[in-house]
Structure formats: structure tokens, C-alpha cells
Amino acid sequence: MCHEGVGMKNYFFSEASSNLDFHSDPTVNEWNNRTPLNMPQCKNCAAIGICGGGCAYGAQLRNGSIWSVDDRFCNHSLSILEWVIWDIYKQSMVSAQRIRLDRASEASHDLNRLLDEPGHERAESERHRN
């Protein structure tokens, strides 16, 4: 049950009974089987992993079936996914730039070390100038 349906009696039992078999109750089974993997309209959605099919109760209220898509939640999930992808991309670009700068700095230090080694022209000319 999603948060939108909390407090609604349509899909809740008024009393917990020792006679209730959750494994054979048709209402419980229908809600247990409602996943985006069982919803054809969700199968090719990029946000399937973060959406969960949206709010089943909201879909029931607006579209008449828990098996329909809750468009509000769907649009929200797609927007969140796009934001996450762009955020990861921006962070990776910053990291890549830092790596390039670190490598350039290391290469510069390595080059200076090589140039300053005894026997190298630069090292010898510096020694002769002093």
C-alpha cells in the first residue's frame, strides 16, 4: 500500500483474524503481484528501477485500476532519474578534470626531476652558471 491510501478501508481488513490466509487471499495476491515488471506499460521505462510502478492506490483513484500507471508518480520518477543522471555526469566530469590536472602536475614534476638529474643538459648548464 502506498502512502496515499493510508487509512482507507477498501484494501484493509478491519480485524486481524487467525482465519486469514495471506497466501490465498485474492486481494492480497493482486497487490503482491503489482510490480512494474508485471505492468506492460512500464517494461521499457528507464525509471522502472526507482519507480516501482507508482502509487497503486492513486492509480485506482484516478484511472479505476491498480494496474494502471499513476502518471503523477511516473513523471516525478522520470524527472528524478534525469536529475540523477545529470548529477552523476557532472560529478564524473569534475573528477575527470581533477585526475587530468593531477596527472599533468605529476608529469611536470617528473619532467623537472629528469631535467635536474646530473648529466642532463639543463642540470649541467645550471651547474656551470652557478
Image (tube, grey):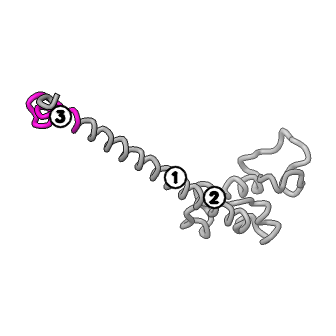
- Few, some or many C-alpha atoms within 10 Å of disc 1 (few <14, some 14-19, many ≥20)? few
Q: Is mark 1 on a helix, strand or loop?
A: helix
Element assignment for label 2: helix
The amino acid type of the residue labelled 3 equals Leu
Give the distance between the C-alpha atoms of the residues marked 3 and 2, in whole angstroms.
Answer: 50 Å
Q: Which residue is tagged 1? A: 88
| Residue toward you, 128 or 123 | 128
Q: What stretch is highlighted in magenta?
A: 111-126
Q: What residue type is labelled 1?
A: Ile
Q: Quadrant of residue 9?
A: bottom right
Q: In this view, does 36 lie to the left or right of 6?
A: left
Q: In which quarter of the image is the C terminus?
A: top left
Q: Quick check: marks 2 and 1 in contact, CB under 8 Å?
A: no
Q: Is residue 64 above or below residue 4?
A: below
**Label 2 amino acid?**
Ile
Q: Name the residue under label 3.
A: 114
